[in-house]
Image (spheres, helix red, strand yellow):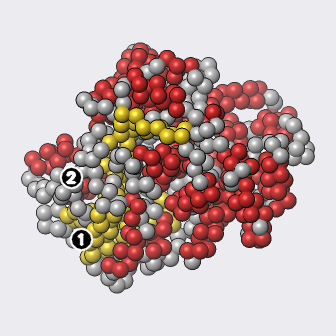
Amino acid sequence: MCGIAGYVRREGAAELAALRAMCDTIRHRGPDDEGYHLDGPCGLGMRRLSIIDLATGHQPIANEDESVWVVFNGEIYNFRELRQELEQRGHRFRTRTDTEVLVHLYEEEAEAGLNRLRGMFAIALWDAPRRRLLLARDRFGKKPLYYALTPEGLWFGSELKCLAAGGAPLGELDREALKFYFVFSHIPDPWSPYRAVKKLTPGGWLSYDAQGDVREGRYWRLPPPAEVPLPGDSEAAAAARVRERFDEAVRLRLVADVPLGAFLSGGIDSSAVVASMALHTSTPVKTFSIGFEEADYNELPYARLVAQRYRTEHHEILVKPDAVALTERLVRHFDEPFGDSSAIPTFLVSEFAARHVKVVLSGDGGDELYAGYDSLRSVEEDARFDRIPRPLRRALGGMAAALPYAAYGKNWLRMASRLSPLERYFERNYAHYFLRRELLEPEWMLPGEEGFLTRALARWLPDPPASPLTQAAYFEATGRLTADMLVKVDRMSMANSLEVRCPLLDHQLAEEAAALPHAWKMRGRQGKRIFVEAMADRLPAELWNRPKQGFGVPLAAWFRGPLRALLWDHLTGATFRQRGVARPRFVEALLREHQAGRRDNSHWLWGLLMMELWFREGERAR
């Protein structure tokens, strides 16, 4: 696991000083080692967190005649099988690391070889004879890769801050991309806060040569969720396949030359990972759990049940963090506005685990692939609106727009008026239109016309025809997963020099999950049914009947306590007002309402605070 950075210039030679500056910004991603390669216009750099082949795994790594060089962030879980095949074809290896497989595979298959890789990765490969740089990213985007394509050349890095440190001209803020933040609490891929910077598409690649020629491709895309079972298949047989694939995915992720453990929240997914790990190892699994003094946010009793059942080497801590210092630290690691407050416990549990191990397995991906979120059930529940005649629905929309903001039922009327079920899904589960209309200045609002989000996010939606439920499920397993959940896990774990592996996001297991119909995943008010059936005999019964509990913090209380001064100072100060993003009077109303306990506005206030802190961090950097 590493951080990577580099560039190819249109004119002039790459410079070591610029490359070092880029890599110094991501030292936290790789505190164990650093390496650089310069070849004319190209510079490759890396910071290494040593996990496999501690002695000879230094990067950059080259092929036999040093015509192909690579820097790599991630893990290739099937590298031993690939190495054996490549050796049979005559390739000679100098190390035991998975990284070296990449240069030889490229020699044989070029970018087509990416489809052979099973793992998580961000790759930068320099083909010296062709003067060509190849960038590639894993299928779900578990490992980040930013790039800036400008008239001067191409810059890339694991974090956005790398590019600026290397002299990349980032250009102006991308206001159109930032507008998405106020809907989703993050900026979706491929956009970034800057017009010149993009995120490489998950499952995609990009090549660039010293003449400035660019090619792009995509080697993998998640199949859309099935709507009916395969002929002859049964739910029991499918559950058995899920269990088998899941155990294989866990086993593959246990390869490491350093101490390894697991996050254990007490939920279904992380508990299933720990159970499978215990079946594959002869020594006790190291497990890590955090809790809070507030009972609603403390899952330690459930985690303890699993730890006791599998006799893990269990580590748990009741945390009371310095909320102000932690908030400001998070902003520096995300590099862009990021409003998912579950980043806080993710950081804390990563910090705790990193005291004992360098690698952990997590349960991320289960809700997205097996329909675990309540948001999907709303798609079917809201289908009742389709029975309302269209003229009446349009009238309801006009009525909703005319009502005062505080009127009860206003959001319900707008959802009823939406002609597209997918638009209703976005409206219900993300930022409501009327709240954004009151909160934001007009120039910071996304277009409100029917179908805008569907068009803008087309790459994260299945090709037609697909049911509304299929469309929403696909978005959650692609767009939302990549830009929210996996960003959170990557940044918060790597801030603590900790590698996180996600067995549920093994692409072969994910393809198996996609082939299962919705009816086998969702039943009544409960999601993930088939995954529960596959793991039922492995976990304590108390876990099956407990209500779903998100991985969160008592943010509402913090905003009335330790974070109150930080919140009010930033959101009522002159600097915030002069930005012209949010309407000061409405922001103050949200603050007063929250402080008085009349309504929990913590989600919106946290999003505004993260945006303002991000602006200020950028101004300090300049």
Q: Secondary structure at mark 1?
A: loop
Q: Quadrant of residue 310?
A: top left
Q: Going 64% across and 67% down the picture, which residue do you hit?
A: 615
Amino acid found under the numbered disc labelled 2: Asp
Left or right of residue 450, residue 129 in this image: left
Q: Secondary structure at mark 2?
A: loop
Residue 105 drawn at (x, y percent): 22, 53
Residue found farthest to the bottom: 12
Quadrant location of the N terminus in the rendered image: bottom left
Q: Going 67% across and 40% down the picture, which residue do you hit?
A: 429
Return the residue at label 2.
53
Quadrant location of the C terminus in the rendered image: bottom right
Q: Quadrant of residue 609?
A: bottom right
Which badge, 1 or 2, is on the more N-terminal residue?
A: 2
Q: Going 18% across and 57% down the picture, which residue do you hit?
A: 55
Left or right of residue 430, residue 15 in this image: left
Amino acid found under the numbered disc labelled 1: Ala
Return the residue at label 1.
128
